[in-house]
Amino acid sequence: MWQELFEVVSGVEWLLTRAQMDPLGLVLDLEHAAKQKCEFGSLVRLSLSPSQQQQTLILHRTVKLMAQALRMDLQELQHDYRSVPSQLVGRLLAHESESTEMQGLLTKLREWEGPMPQGWWGKNSNKTKQTNEHKKNQKHKQTTRNQQKRK
């Protein structure tokens, strides 16, 4: 059930909700999940095909890396739980090429627009981009009108 577990723990909303409740608890949950794989690894090997075993190992490694990354930033998480996506991206970026699962996780974290209108990256969200484009168009129209008046 590693695929199901990974889908839950890699969800941005779940990560944020869990970090808001208890940042250390989030780290411990991820570490516990990784430990279970180690303890029950022989049972998993008996019941899975080689490709499923490989997939399980990749998911396990990704969860383990998530736990390690968040543990390193635990003090920041206790200060502001909303830093989970940026902390994970910053710490896991070096592992992006390791698997499609890691790539998918990092893409999901990067695409999350965040609690602020400008997005957590400080980039404009689609809504803000549209507003900015509208303002730019209005400004251009005003400049054009002013130039025509001068003529």
Image: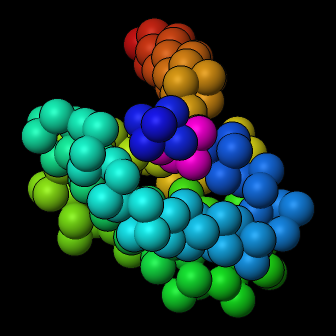
Q: Main secondary structure of the magenta part?
A: helix
**Relative horizontal placement of residue 53, taking residue 63 as reference (left or right):** left
> Residue 9 in magenta?
yes
x and y, in percent, of residue 87 in the image: 51, 70
Q: Residue at x 47, y 79 (%)?
A: 68
Residue at the image point whose x is 59% and y is 69% from the top: 32
| 90 relative position to 113: left or right | left
Above or below, 42 against 113 in this view is below
**Residue 4 position (above or below residue 17):** above
Tag count: 0
Q: Quadrant of residue 83?
A: bottom right
Q: Which residues are magenta?
A: 6-10
Task: Name the quarter where the C terminus is drawn.
Answer: top left
Instruction: Choose between 99 and 115: the one closer to the eye.
Output: 99
Residue 132 visible (yes or no): no
**Is residue 134 something that shows in the picture?**
yes
Residue 5 on image: x %, y %: 53, 42
| Res. 42 image quadrant | bottom left
Residue 89 part of the magenta-drawn span: no
Percent position (x, y) of residue 8?
A: 59, 39
Q: Does residue 48 lie above or below 99 as drawn?
A: above
In depth, the one of 117 and 69 nearer the eye is: 69
* Residue at 66% in and 65% down: 29
For residue 3, above or below residue 44: above
Colouring scheme applied when the structure was drawn? rainbow
